[in-house]
DNA sequence: AACTTGCGCAACCGCCAGTCG
DNA sequence: GCGACTGGCGGTTGCGCAAGT
């Protein structure tokens, strides 16, 4: 037990990574693949601890990472997910495959947290209920509060319970209850399992397959390969569809 | 131009859970 | 069952830079 001793060893380099170190790490991982971080420092000759190597890879060097310039779409999604999940950055990051948990965490702490608090304080001053803290326009979102399992209980902190997620998905699979401008064709959606272990969540559908829904013109089958989460997003995460739907419904592009 | 302040972000720290011998 | 080890996560720190004075 106890924490890892790897970073306490004498001779371990700390601080910013140099381009040379990055090249060494990337070339090693390209050859051997990520994993077995313990052996990376010894095999590469990097004077870094395994943790540092892993973090550098996952937060910076990993292919498919999108950096900076969060779009309103992404902002809205982060705010929404944070209100539902709390500070489960890894879980939130799984909804945005191109973003790292560290990036999202930083962005929340430096930008969004203040924005949300400001919006909430304005909403409270006006005596109005604030839709999950980032859009108090009840006219625009009047249909949302009756659709999504979201409520405000006197504070900006939204309980990060499984009930919220389950309810959200349950309602999400019932298009008939929601008013929308686009024709909704939700078919054969068979979510049957939601796990919440150690902050990670996954949604499993029958045979790891489901038909897409709202944002697409025509339903199509998508096979979900969990391994694709590692190296970015050439496949659409099942939850990105939820994301798209949520944003269409709850956030719009006014954020 | 020099100094101060605030911000953004990469990296570190400390803890936890899972695995293995 | 126990302890060592590892990977993963969230919180925090500290450096570099830009903006303000």
Image (tube, coloured by chain):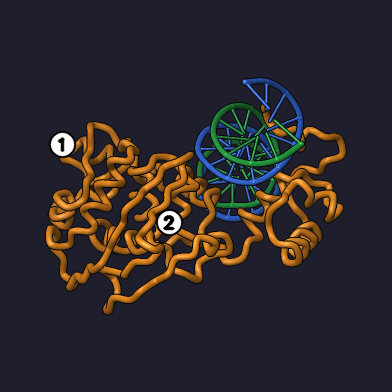
Chain colours: A orange, B green, C blue
Q: Specify whether A197 is left or right of A190.
A: right
Disc on the earlier residue, 2 or 1: 2
Q: Is residue A254 in view from this perspective?
A: no
**The C terminus of chain A, quarter of image:** bottom left
* Residue A41 coordinates in the image, percent (x, y): 81, 49
Q: Specify whether A58 is left or right of A254.
A: right
Q: Which residue is mark 1?
A: A127
- The residue drawn where x is 43% and y is 69% is A223
Q: Is residue A53 in view from this perspective?
A: yes
- A183, above or below B13, in the image: below
Mark number, residue A95:
2
In the image shown, does A180 or A30 lie closer to the viewer? Answer: A30
- The residue drawn where x is 68% and y is 30% is A3
Determine crowd level at label 2: few under 14, some 14-19, many 20+ residues with C-alpha closer than 10 A: many
Mark number, residue A159:
none
Which element carries disc 1, helix, strand or loop?
loop
Determine crowd level at label 1: few under 14, some 14-19, many 20+ residues with C-alpha closer than 10 A: few
Q: Specify whether A141 is left or right of A198.
A: left
* Residue A143 coordinates in the image, percent (x, y): 14, 55
Marks 2, 1 in one chain: yes
Q: Nearer the viewer, mark 2 or mark 1?
A: 2
Q: Are marks 2 and 1 in contact (CB under 8 Å)?
A: no
- A170, above or below A130, in the image: below
- A244, above or below A120, in the image: below
* Residue A195 coordinates in the image, percent (x, y): 40, 45
Q: Chain of mark 1?
A: A
- C3, above or below A57, in the image: above
Q: CA distance from mark 2 to mark 1?
A: 33 Å
- The residue drawn where x is 77% and y is 43% is A49
């Amino acid at each position: 037990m106890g924490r890892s001793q790897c970073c306490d060893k004498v001779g371990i380099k700390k601080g910013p990574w140099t381009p040379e170190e990055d090249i060494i790490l990337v070339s090693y991982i390209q050859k051997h693949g990520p994993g077995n971080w313990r052996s990376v420092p010894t095999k590469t000759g990097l004077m870094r601890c395994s943790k540092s190597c892993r973090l550098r890879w996952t937060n910076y060097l990993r292919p498919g990472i999108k950096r900076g310039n969060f779009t309103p779409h992404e902002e809205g999604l982060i705010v929404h997910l944070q209100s539902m999940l709390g500070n489960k950055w890894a879980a939130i990051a799984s909804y945005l495959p191109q973003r790292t948990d560290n990036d999202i965490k930083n962005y929340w702490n430096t930008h969004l947290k203040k924005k949300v608090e400001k919006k909430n304080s304005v909403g409270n001053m006006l005596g109005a209920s604030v839709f999950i803290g980032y859009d108090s326009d009840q006219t625009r979102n009047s249909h949302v509060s009756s659709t999504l399992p979201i409520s405000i209980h006197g504070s900006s902190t939204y309980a990060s319970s499984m009930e919220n997620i389950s309810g959200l998905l349950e309602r999400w699979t019932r298009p008939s209850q929601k008013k929308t401008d686009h024709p909704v064709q939700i078919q054969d959606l068979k979510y049957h399992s939601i796990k919440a272990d150690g902050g990670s969540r996954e949604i499993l559908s029958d045979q790891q397959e489901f038909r897409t829904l709202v944002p697409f013109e025509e339903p199509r089958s998508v096979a979900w390969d969990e391994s694709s989460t590692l190296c970015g997003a050439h496949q659409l995460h099942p939850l990105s569809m939820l994301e798209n739907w949520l944003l269409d419904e709850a956030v719009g592009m006014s954020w």
